[in-house]
Image: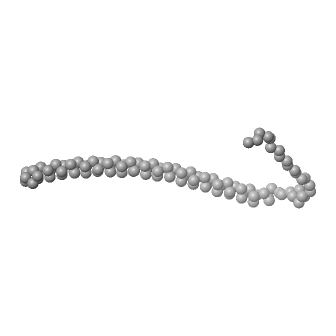
Amino acid sequence: LSSRPLKWEINVDMGDTEFSRSPATRQEFKGVEKTVHSTIARAEAISAENEYEKVTEMEFRDASESMNSHVVFVSLFIMVVEAGLVGWQISHLRGFFRREKLI
């Protein structure tokens, strides 16, 4: 990138315009002021709604992650119980077949 300073030119043309002949009165700016205030109020309402949605989404994400960790714990517990049950069944059947002299 070049380190040369940028050169800016501004030309202002001052002259007799319609506005300078009959400047706006305070009353005429009331409508503009109301529009600006309503626009600011809407922007603040949108900002507040976005903040609420952000907080709600974070709470939902935290609840979802907590539920997922509980589901993983329960799933692992069920797998361990099933593995123990399978081991017990194999042991029990092996003893049964030996008693019946099938093995």
Q: Residue at x 90, y 53 (%)?
A: 14
Residue 38 image-quadrant placement:
bottom right
**Residue in the foreground of this view, choosing between 25 and 76:** 76
**Residue in the foreground of this view, choosing between 24 and 11:** 11
Q: Residue at x 80, y 59 (%)?
A: 28
Where is residue 62? Give x, y as percent: 45, 48
Q: Is residue 46 left or right of residue 9?
A: left
Where is residue 49? Give x, y as percent: 57, 54
Q: Is residue 13 left or right of residue 44?
A: right
Q: Is residue 20 left or right of residue 60?
A: right
Q: Is residue 76 left or right of residue 103?
A: right
Task: For residue 40, say whether it is visible.
Answer: yes
**What colour-coding does the image apply?**
one colour
Task: For residue 22, say whether it is visible.
Answer: no
Farthest front residue? 103
Quadrant showing the N terminus: top right
Farthest top residue? 3
How many labels were placed on the picture?
0
Q: Residue at x 18, y 51 (%)?
A: 89
**Residue in the foreground of this view, choosing between 34 and 72:** 72
Q: Is residue 32 above or below residue 73?
A: below
Where is residue 79? Give x, y as percent: 29, 50
Where is residue 30? Give x, y as percent: 76, 58
Residue 26 image-quadrant placement:
bottom right
